[in-house]
């Protein structure tokens, strides 16, 4: 059952939310569309939180953390001019994941990240979507560099980062408060 605060607005509030969403750039790839996230996309983001190590304990706390993280990522567009995109199949409009450009509390740099639904995994969607998001970040957004913070056990995300041309940055890793790999994406590597 959906919590009351996770239900879409109706009426004038829904119209206003749609107007704000229309300001988020839509990016198409051959198979995918990156679009503004809607409240109905929350389960995609929540899945990431619930897949983290230790997620079996404290479901209520994780649900709250997932909701607050989702709200932060969506608000990034309004506050910073970058944030999250829901990734959907152009063939049928089914959401298959999310791409995020975000500067999370406590992180030293702006990050590009990705998460897929179980149905979206293993099809090259993360690489395809993140590649276009990087083009947009290094083009119209004007970034020179972004990083991907990747858990040591996440081989799949490391493979995506490498396919995108990112390289590990040991200096950035040494500056992190929590243990992870830092993969650096640069405009020059994409050229």
Image (cartoon, rainbow, N blue to C red):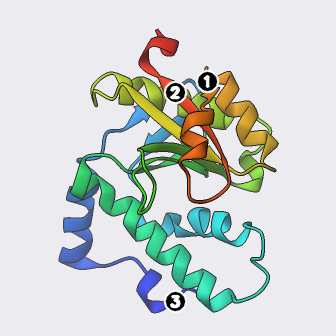
The reply to whether the C-beta atoms of the residues labelled 2 and 1 are less than 8 Å apart is yes
Q: Which residue is mark 2?
A: 185
The residue depicted at 25 percent of the width and 46 percent of the height is 81
Q: How much space separates mark 2 and mark 1, taking CA atoms?
A: 8 Å
The residue depicted at 63 percent of the width and 34 percent of the height is 170
In front: 160, or 46? 160
Q: How much space separates mark 3 and mark 1, taking CA atoms?
A: 37 Å
In front: 167, or 160? 167
Residue 47, image x, y percentages: 67, 66
Left or right of 64: which side holds 119? right
Residue 122 to residue 38: above or below: above
Residue 89, image x, y percentages: 59, 41
Mark closer to the observer (2, 3): 2
User: Of label 2 and label 3, which has the lower sequence position?
Assistant: 3
Do we see residue 46 in this rendering? yes
User: Of label 2 and label 1, which has the lower sequence position?
Assistant: 1
The residue depicted at 33 percent of the width and 29 percent of the height is 143
Element type where label 3 sits in the image: loop
Q: Alpha-carbon neighbours of circle 2 within 10 Å: few (<14), some, or many (≥20)?
A: many
Q: Which residue is mark 3?
A: 3
Element type where label 1 sits in the image: loop
Q: Which residue is mark 1?
A: 164
The reply to whether the C-beta atoms of the residues labelled 3 and 1 are less than 8 Å apart is no
Left or right of 9: which side holds 177? right
């Amino acid at each position: 059952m959906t919590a009351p605060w996770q239900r879409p607005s109706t009426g004038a509030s829904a119209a206003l939310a749609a107007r704000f969403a229309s300001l988020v750039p839509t990016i198409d790839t051959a198979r995918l569309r990156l679009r503004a996230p809607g409240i109905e996309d929350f389960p995609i983001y929540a899945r990431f939180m619930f897949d983290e190590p230790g997620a079996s304990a404290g479901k209520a706390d994780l649900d709250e953390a997932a909701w607050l993280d989702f709200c932060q990522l969506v608000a990034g567009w309004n506050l910073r001019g970058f944030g999250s995109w829901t990734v959907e199949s152009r063939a049928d409009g089914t959401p298959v994941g999310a791409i995020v450009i975000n500067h999370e509390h406590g992180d030293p740099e702006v990050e590009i990240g990705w998460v897929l639904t179980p149905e979206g995994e293993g099809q090259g969607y993360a690489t395809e979507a993140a590649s276009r998001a990087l083009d947009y970040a290094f083009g119209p957004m004007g970034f020179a560099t972004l990083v991907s913070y990747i858990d040591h056990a996440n081989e799949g995300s490391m493979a995506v980062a490498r396919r995108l041309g990112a390289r590990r940055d040991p200096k950035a890793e040494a500056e992190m408060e929590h243990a992870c790999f830092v993969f650096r994406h640069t405009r020059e590597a994409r050229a």
